[in-house]
Image (cartoon, grey):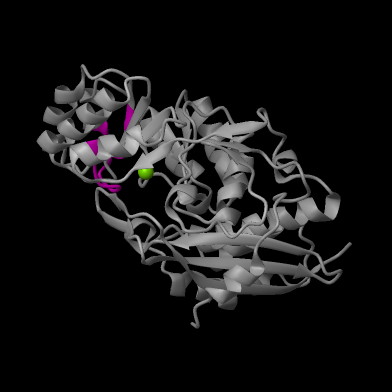
C-alpha cells in the first residue's frame, strides 16, 4: 500500500476576467486576481493528488497566508507516512490539531487536503471521485450563473447575455427599493428563468420584511439565501417566518452540527453546501444527510474556485439531489480554470469518469501564478 511522502501548499493569484460584486463587497475585479491555495499530495509510488481552497477572508475568515501556513505547519505533516485511504484517521487528526473551537477550525485548509486525498484514492484505484462518494446520479450537471451586483439594467443585461442558463443567482445588497428593481428587471429580461436570490448577509431583519413583501408577486423566485448576518440566528428565524418563499442558509452553516442547530431552531428551510467551507467532500455528505433527515432542502454552490475545486464540487453534486442547479461560478469569473480538459456544453458540465478528479491539472499555469509566502 502506497503512503504519502510529500504535501506541498502552493499559494497563487488567479486572474479575474469579469468583476464579481456581492452584498458585502467585491469578490474580484476584472484585471485583478483572487487568492487560492493549491495542494499537491504525492505518494511514495509517484501518484499525485490535487486539492484547492479559495482564500476570500471577507467571506470565510481564512486568508491565503493562514491556509498555506496551516497546511505547511500543522495539517500537511499529519498525512506523511499514511495511506491516502486512511481518510477517517486523517480527518480526526486534523480536527484534533486545529480544533473547531472559537472558530470553525480552518475548514478551507482542511478541504483542500481532503480533495487531494480523494483525487489520490481515485487515481490509485482507477475510480472517479463520484464513485468514491457512492456514485453519480446524473452524467451532466447544469449550472446556475451568478449575477454580480450592478444597476438593475446592467444585471438584466447579464441575464439576457446568458441564454444557455436557466437559473440565476441574483445578488442583492440590503437596499429594498433598488434590490426590488434588480429582481424585477431580471425577471422581465428572462421570464423563463428560475431566480435564486442571495443577500450575502446584507439585510437587517427590519429592512428585510419590506423587501420580501415587495418582490412576493414576481414570478419564479425560488428562495432567498442568507438574508442576515451569519451569527444572527434570530434574524434568520424572523426571515423564515415572514418570507413568502423559502430561506436558505450559507454563511451561517459550515458543518453537520450547524445543520442540526438550524433544524432545531427552524432558522431556514434550505441548506447551501460548499465543499470548501465544510472541510471536505465527506463532511458535505454528512451535512446533506442531516439536512435530509430534518426535511431541509439542499442547494450547492462554490466560491470562485478554479478547476480543481470546481470539478471536486461537480463530482459531489452529481451524487446529490439538489433542488436547483449548483452555482459554481469560477467558470464565469476567472480568466482560466487551469485544467487541460474541462468538458462543458454551455452551462452544463459533463461529470468526469476518469480516475480521481478525472481532469488534467495545468501545473505549469499554477506554478507561473504562484505567490511567495
Ligand atoms: Mg451564498
Report the residue at 83% width, 69% height from top: 46
Q: Residue 253: x percent and y percent?
A: 41, 44
Q: Which residues are magenta?
A: 223-237
- Single out the residue that lies furthest toward the bottom: 372
Instruction: Report whether 330 appears left or right of 24.
Output: right
Q: Quadrant of residue 29?
A: bottom left
In this view, the residue in front, 58 or 100, is: 58
State the image coordinates of residue 100 (x, y, percent, origin top left). 47, 59
Residue 160 appears left or right of 206: right
Who is closer to the viewer here, 331 or 123? Answer: 331
Question: In this orientation, does residue 21 appear?
Answer: yes
Does residue 77 lie above or below 306 as drawn? below
Q: Which residue occupies the foreground of this view, 102 or 157? A: 157
Camera sees residue 263: no
Does 27 sit left or right of 14 as displayed?
left
Instruction: Say which residue appears at 47% left-offset and 43% top-offset.
Output: 257
Toward the viewer: 327 or 368?
368
The quadrant of the picture showing ligand 1 is: top left
Please say if 194 is above or below 87. Answer: above
> Which percent across, then down, holds residue 266?
34, 29
Amino acid at each position: 500500500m502506497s503512503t504519502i511522502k510529500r504535501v506541498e501548499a502552493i499559494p497563487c493569484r488567479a486572474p479575474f476576467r469579469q468583476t464579481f460584486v456581492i452584498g458585502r463587497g467585491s469578490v474580484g475585479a476584472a484585471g485583478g486576481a483572487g487568492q487560492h491555495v493549491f495542494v499537491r499530495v504525492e505518494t511514495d509510488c509517484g501518484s499525485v493528488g490535487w486539492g484547492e481552497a479559495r482564500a476570500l477572508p471577507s467571506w470565510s475568515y481564512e486568508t491565503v497566508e493562514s491556509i498555506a501556513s496551516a497546511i505547511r505547519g500543522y495539517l500537511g505533516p499529519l498525512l506523511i507516512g499514511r495511506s491516502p485511504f486512511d481518510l477517517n484517521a486523517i480527518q480526526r487528526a486534523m480536527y484534533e490539531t486545529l480544533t473547531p473551537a472559537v472558530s470553525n477550525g480552518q475548514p478551507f485548509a482542511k478541504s483542500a487536503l481532503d480533495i487531494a486525498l480523494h483525487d489520490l484514492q481515485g487515481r490509485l484505484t482507477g475510480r472517479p471521485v463520484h464513485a468514491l462518494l457512492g456514485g453519480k446520479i446524473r452524467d451532466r450537471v447544469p449550472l446556475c450563473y451568478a449575477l454580480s451586483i450592478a444597476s438593475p439594467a446592467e444585471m438584466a443585461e447579464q441575464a439576457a447575455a446568458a441564454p444557455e442558463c436557466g437559473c440565476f443567482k441574483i445578488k442583492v445588497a440590503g437596499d429594498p427599493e433598488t434590490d426590488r428593481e434588480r429582481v424585477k428587471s431580471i425577471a422581465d429580461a428572462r421570464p423563463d428563468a428560475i431566480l435564486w436570490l442571495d443577500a450575502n448577509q446584507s439585510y437587517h431583519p427590519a429592512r428585510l420584511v419590506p423587501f420580501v413583501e415587495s418582490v412576493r408577486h414576481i414570478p419564479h423566485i425560488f428562495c432567498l439565501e442568507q438574508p442576515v448576518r451569519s451569527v444572527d440566528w434570530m434574524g434568520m428565524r424572523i426571515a423564515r417566518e415572514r418570507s413568502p418563499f423559502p430561506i436558505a442558509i450559507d454563511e451561517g452553516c459550515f458543518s453537520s452540527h450547524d445543520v442540526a442547530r438550524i433544524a432545531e431552531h427552524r432558522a431556514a428551510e434550505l441548506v447551501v453546501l460548499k465543499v470548501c467551507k465544510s472541510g471536505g467532500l465527506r463532511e458535505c455528505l454528512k451535512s446533506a444527510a442531516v439536512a435530509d433527515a430534518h426535511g431541509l432542502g439542499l442547494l450547492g454552490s462554490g466560491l470562485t474556485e478554479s478547476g480543481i475545486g470546481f470539478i471536486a464540487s461537480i463530482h459531489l453534486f452529481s451524487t446529490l439531489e439538489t433542488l436547483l442547479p449548483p452555482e459554481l461560478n469560477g467558470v464565469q469569473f476567472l480568466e482560466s480554470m487551469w485544467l487541460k480538459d474541462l468538458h462543458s456544453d454551455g452551462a452544463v458540465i459533463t461529470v468526469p469518469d476518469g480516475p480521481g478528479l478525472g481532469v488534467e491539472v495545468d501545473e505549469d499555469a499554477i506554478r507561473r501564478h504562484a505567490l511567495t509566502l
